Image (spheres, rainbow, N blue to C red):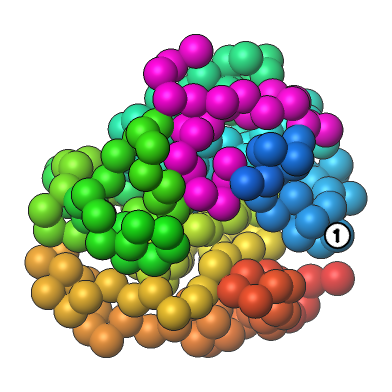
Amino acid sequence: MPAGTVTACTAYGTLTLFRNDWVFAFYAQAGLIFEHDIFEVYLKQRAKSWTAAIDVGAHVGSYTLMLGNTNPALRIFAFEPQEPIYRLLVQNILENGLIHVTHTRAAIGHRNISEVHLSCSITDGPSAGEDISYGGNTILNLGGMQLGDDGELVAMLTLDGFEFPHIDFVKIDVEGAESLVLLGARRLIERDSPLIQFEHNHKILPEHVLRSINAPWPLPAPEELLQDWGYRIIQVSTDNFIGERRNET
């Protein structure tokens, strides 16, 4: 087991994560997966009939694990930009025998860029503003990493740049960059009309970060984009929403 990690036994399989990963570690102590309640109420039954799904901002694999356990034949495409978190994602995929998961270390956004920066600190949660550390004694919201200008380098890719099969579901949790993901997935959304779960809260990306990657400023809200594209939006928690094509049943 990598240094500074803990492993939780959950109803969906084992999940290894960093011990200082604030929200995720709290749930893991109880043998639970973060946002399991949203999954079980709104997604689990539907997932049994899906053939392919995308997990953007997969973190250590919470949704990937829940989806793969619920529907072992489901093809899942998981994306995570933080290199230490990505290593745990891969470990969790392998240890749970999720043979139909394709994983990629990348930030997903509105255009293909060879290198973008993540931030070097987290802006919310315990110890906000302190330098990022993985597995140490400082409790951090490791799931709260945003794009930045002084942290880890990673490629940015668009979902439209992949040759995916028909996609039934897209989950997006990327700390203020949700609209960038949608802008880079317009053709996929038009083609497949997937169910889309996304986070939207107080987090926004700074103007200088958006301008450095030639992104729109101000950035439209994800709800606005999806509504303009024919989706209806329902709120499923304080900062989680599900979008569904208006003509879908």
Residue 62, quarter of the rendered image: top right
Badge 1: few (under 14), some or many (20 or more) residues near its Cα, within 10 Å? few
Q: Is residue 196 magenta?
A: no
Residue 182 pos. (x, y %): 44, 66
> Is residue 42 toward the left or the right of residue 103 in the image?
right
Q: Is residue 62 left or right of residue 184?
A: right
* Label 1 sits on residue: 41
The three-letter amino acid code for the residue at tag 1 is Val
> Quarter-wise, where is residue 239 in the image?
bottom right
Q: Closest to the observer: 22 or 108?
A: 22
Q: Which residues are magenta?
A: 1-25
Residue 10 showing in the rendered view: yes
Residue occupying the point 72% across, 32% down = 68
Q: Residue at x 86, y 71 (%)?
A: 249
The answer to whether 44 is drawn above or below residue 80 in the figure is below
Please give left or right for residue 249 compared with residue 73 in the image: right
- Is 198 on the left or on the right of 243, as rendered? left
Give percent across and percent down for residue 162: 41, 42
**Place of residue 75 in the rendered image (x, y in percent of width and height, measured from the top left):** 65, 32
Q: Residue furthest right?
A: 45
- Residue 159 in sight: no
Q: Nearer the viewer, residue 140 or 243?
A: 140
Q: Which x, y percent locates residue 212?
A: 10, 66
Residue drawn at x 20%, y 60% is 148
Examine the rendered structure and indicate whether residue 32 appears above or below residue 191: above
Residue toward you, 212 or 205: 205
Q: Could you say whether the residue bearing mark 1 is in a helix, strand or loop?
A: helix
